[in-house]
Image (tube, rainbow, N blue to C red):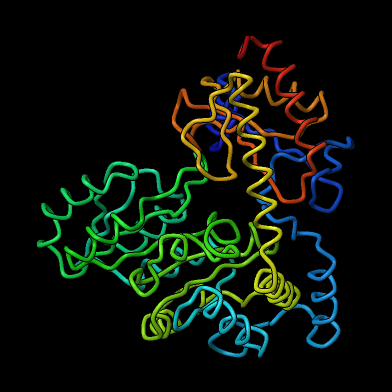
Amino acid sequence: MPRVDAWVDEELNSLKESGLFNRIRTIGSAQGAWLQVDGRHVLNFCSNNYLGLANHPRLVAAAHGAMDKFGIGPAAVRSIAGTMDLHVELDKRMAAFKGVEAAVTFQSGFTANLGVIPALVGKEDVIFSDELNHASIIDGSRLSGATIVRYKHCDPADLGRVLAAERGKYRRALVVTDGVFSMDGDQAPLADIYAKSSQADAMLMVDDAHGEGVLGKGGRGIVDHFGLHGKVDIEVGTFSKAFGVVGGVAAGRAPLVDWLRQRGRPFLFSSAMTVPDVAACLAAIDLLETSTELVERLWANTELFKREMKKLGFDTGRSVTPITPVILGEAKVAQEFSAALFEAGVFAMAIAFPTVARGAARIRVMISAAHSTDDLEQGLQAFSEVGRKLGVIQ
């Protein structure tokens, strides 16, 4: 009798033949500008560790200190017995950092979107979603049961068109967009999106996962960047990127945040953030509130790397942030390029379908404040050599 899961073998073989099988490498060191990956010492161009905080001594010390007092796990969901005073402090500090009335934390940025969207809209409602929104927004929208209407990427005019055509058919409406798009590094025209949303009496939600710690004064995010405080109804974010830890957050007006505490399913049905994570997040906020040095260094590194990559002749797409896509086209080419970079001492993974569209495979370089100028020059040299060897550049 044939195995009932034989189809899995066929699908995996198909992925390998098409260059879409993701061979996951193993890291044997703390995150930083350099890593031990599969036993090799390599330059790290992969991590979302924008500010180099993932191994910052103050975050590590804060985590240790909190574990000495509180242990490790909360052992309960927030709504029953898992809300520690550390959680309350983080909620308050994030609200102050983002310049909003209130905030509530989740276990990750992904679960924040899964909790927020279904709490705001349901079967009688409609979601207007950028066509390139993150998978967590897509999944949260599906879970809500609301009708989903996609609009063209970063196109306020098309958003206005679909709002005019569809808004009147539904009870409530939610416009949702990433702030910074993780694969291309471009940013949403949030001021124009707000204008269209407010005209149509629609709530506005932005996922600021790649904007926090990067955009705005001292890394306060895309809402601060555009001066839209009090106009965006809900900001969703993550602590797993610029903050260097893990966890999610939703921030906005106090009544909306209270509603999320009552109806956000991951908040209600999954254990709270662990003690060391919460303490490390608080230490990260301390650093960001007292100095803009890391954010400024991140942008200086970004500008250097992008300028030199364009001089070399690489296609870096439409990025305006530290996310630097190196567009290569076919998945097999991107995988070959990544493997050659690794042999040259640079860890930069290939990204292909379904994460990006077919024919748009790339190496996505994530610049960090932890990189020195020498690190960037070494990385640029590796890209130059591999690009010429593979015929990507002249």
Q: Evaluate whether residue 174 shows in this view.
A: yes
- Please tell me in which quadrant of the rendered image residue 66 appears: bottom right
| Residue closest to the eye, 368 or 279 | 368
Which image quarter: residue 323?
top right
Say above or below: 149 vs 288: above
Establish if 316 lies above or below 230.
above
Residue at x 36% of width, y 56% of height: 190
Whole-percent x and y of residue 336? 67, 19
Q: Position of residue 358 (x, y in %)?
A: 45, 26
State the image coordinates of residue 166 (x, y, percent, origin top left).
13, 55
Q: Nearer the viewer, residue 225 or 85?
A: 225
In the rendered view of the protein, which quadrant contains the N terminus? top right
Q: Horizontally, is 255 left or right of 162 in the view?
A: right
Residue 227 location, quadrant: bottom left
What's the residue at 24%, 61% (across, down)? 197
Q: Nearer the viewer, residue 42 or 384?
A: 384
- How far across and down, in percent of the image, does residue 313 sit? 59, 19
Q: Is residue 143 above or below residue 231?
A: above
Who's the residue at 61% across and 22% down the image?
Answer: 311
Residue drawn at x 68%, y 82% is: 75
Disc count in the image? 0
Q: Quadrant of the C terminus?
A: top right
Answer left or right for 148 relative to 393.
Answer: left
Residue 1 in view here: no
